[in-house]
Amino acid sequence: MTGSPPGRARAGRLHRAALAGTALLTAAATALLPASPAWAHAELKATTPVADSVVAKAPTSVRVTFSEKVSGGGTALRVLDAKGAVRSRPATFAGSSVQAGTPGLPKGRYALVWSVLSSDGHRITSARAFSVGLATPSAAAKTLTMKDAKNRSRPVRLSGDRVGVRTLGLPVNALDGTVSLSHPRIPTALVWQAKGTSARGMLPFPGTYAVTIRVRVSQFDEVVLVGSLTARA
Ligand SMILES: [Cu+2]
């Protein structure tokens, strides 16, 4: 399996575009409306195991919870190992949560991947990393050469000293945003949260990740940097 299924990738982009549009409308409407309207989209609330965590004991199931009801089929939530093999049972839905059994999950690092349907009709596709009893080994820090929207080089520092997670030093001060990391064995990009001048997360599998940093630096300005990084272990 290589890359994202094009339909899913497109749905993800459309959803992000819809979110950006809503954010602008919300900002413009806030001055006019005494109470802020509820968000129309199902937002990610939590994952179990927690994203980028190393858990000592293998979980017997994994779960992703959203802000509202979600639905989908048996492949809507999957746990993938470093070979891209599915290590979870078929997904089941309960209200705003989707879960899947993971009996006998061995020690290792995994990707938790989901593609669910929000009650507003949008597909929500994303992935997070977690580990069972196996920290990411430390590695030498390195500088990644990222490119901005005008194709200018922007160096970004990737730490290697912290065992379990990596930290990306951002060349801008981010209000918020994400780092998306696409790996050939994971059908959709892993996401790290970005805030301030850094983003932290796990690189679960060895190999080369395509990296997109997308952060807001002011209410209406976004910075996008693209590049890649290679993890040895
Ligand atoms: Cu939506």
Image: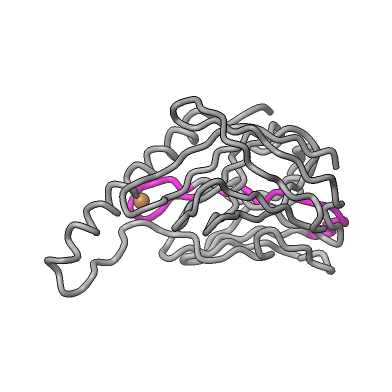
Q: Residue at x 85, y 47 (%)?
A: 139
Residue 107 figure quarter:
bottom right
Q: Observer-nearest residue: 157 or 14?
A: 157
Q: Is 131 situated left or right of 48 in this image? A: right
Name the spot of residue 63 as percent of width and height, x first: 62, 63
Q: Observer-nearest residue: 175 or 34?
A: 175
Hey, which residue is sitting farthest bottom in the picture?
Answer: 34
Q: Is 182 situated left or right of 38 in this image? A: right
Q: Is 85 situated left or right of 182 in this image? A: right
Q: Which residues are magenta?
A: 103-124
Residue 194 figure quarter:
bottom right
Name the spot of residue 11 as percent of width and height, x first: 42, 37
**Can see residue 210?**
yes
Taking the magenta stretch, the answer to whether it contains residue 110 is yes
The quadrant in which the N terminus is found is: top right
Q: Is 101 situated left or right of 120 in this image? A: right
- Image height check: is 36 above or below 129? below
Taking the magenta stretch, the answer to whether it contains residue 78 is no
**Can see residue 74?**
no
Name the spot of residue 152 as percent of width and height, x first: 51, 27
Name the spot of residue 3 as percent of width and height, x first: 62, 29
> How many numbered marks are there?
0
Q: Observer-nearest residue: 51 or 113?
A: 51
Q: Residue at x 30, y 54 (%)?
A: 23
